[in-house]
Image: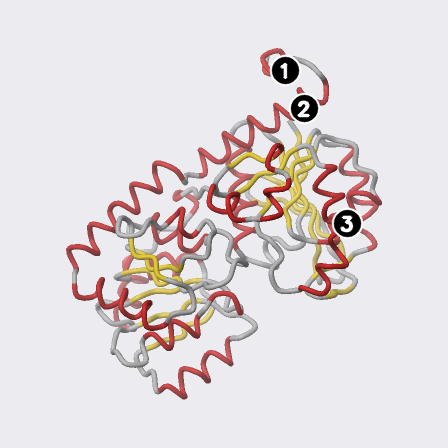
Amino acid sequence: MRVLHFYKTYYPDSLGGVEQVIRQLCVGTGRLGVSNQVLTLTRAKDPASFEFEGHTVHPVRLDFELASTGFSAAAFSQLARMARQCDVVHYHFPWPFMDLAHFVARVKKPSVVTYHSDIVRQKKLLFLYQPLKHRFLQSVDQIVATSPNYLASSAVLERYKDKTRIITYGLDKQTYPEPDQERLARWRALVPGRFFLFVGVLRYYKGLHILLDAVANSDYPVVIVGAGPIEEELKAHAARLGLGHVMFVGALDDADKVALLKLCYAVAFPSHLRSEAFGISLLEGAMYGKPMISSEIGTGTSYINIHRDTGLVVPPSDPRAFGEAMRTLWENPELAQAMGKRAEARYWELFTAEQMASRYAQLYQELVARRARVPLAQLRA
């Protein structure tokens, strides 16, 4: 089984949540006999294909960006060529250029699109993009929603409910490096004994201004891991509020991130807009047995974090409610510890990479069998 993934960014250029999902998919399905390739865009002047964790990455030159959408003339011919050589094309939505490339390249192979998120911010351009978007979603063989919450709350997915199934994200804990004692000791010397942790790209929809406002009248230590387009804005906001108990530590490698996940008291995840469709770093907190605080935005965050079970869920854009949730966990260590244990149990039950890979591998086989009009059992044989 040969699968081609197509997405606008990938390792090592970008380390976001969708890239992590594609990585976990490639590694997980690779163990099940799937040969994976990733076609992506890059700013590098002379891109060359390379091997990464058992799959091949094919970067092509990014020509320009419009409204955060990357365009590449070279991607059209590359997609057409690679699609002819694979069994299934796996698209990752949203990326409007991808929809266009699908038709220009005249892709005829079985296709699946993982619907990672609605388009939330670009309202005017979204209106112009609507016809292409719906033509693309109509043309693919299968759509995958990443949580029952998102399927239930997305008006776009409601329109394609009959061709949509749910496969949640999964993470493989074994792919995360185990920090050595020296690294852990170094971080223990830098951070307080108890602290709330945020991990993620510093973007508008992450709601970090809400977190900063939430701790303005308290002394709960907060460590913020990540970099991004609003980093300086957030630091200025923290300075205005006089938040000496908030640490911005920048983007970290995986070993340092894991060290802080192990050391933290709880995970604070204040995303307040539907652009946060799932929350990979929230799931990482659950994987490491931490209680979580998140906001109810009708997405996968509330499938990971169950209110009063694995953590606390508060209304979005409400610093007071978020601060109260932090106080509840801070003042009740036994409650926080019990929530963290249940969060880890839920990870093992629902969110492992092995489960995600198995479900996608089965879907790939179904798509090929459906297109070939042969029984699935015969294809497996």
Mark 2 lies on a secondary structure that is helix
Tally the numbered discs.
3
Quadrant (top left, top right, bottom left, bottom right) of the N terminus:
top right
Q: Position of residue 29 (x, y in %)?
A: 54, 33
Q: Position of residue 242 (x, y in %)?
A: 35, 87
- Residue that numbered label 1 is attached to: 379
- Name the residue: 55% across, 26% down: 362
Q: Nearer the viewer, mark 3 or mark 1?
A: 3
Among numbered discs 3 and 1, the one appearing first in the sequence: 3
Mark 3 lies on a secondary structure that is helix
Residue closest to the eye, 357 or 331:
331
Among numbered discs 2 and 1, the one appearing first in the sequence: 2
Residue type of the residue flagged with mark 1: Leu
Q: Give the left or right position of residue 107, taking residue 278 as reference.
A: right
- Residue that numbered label 2 is attached to: 368
Q: Nearer the viewer, mark 2 or mark 3?
A: 3
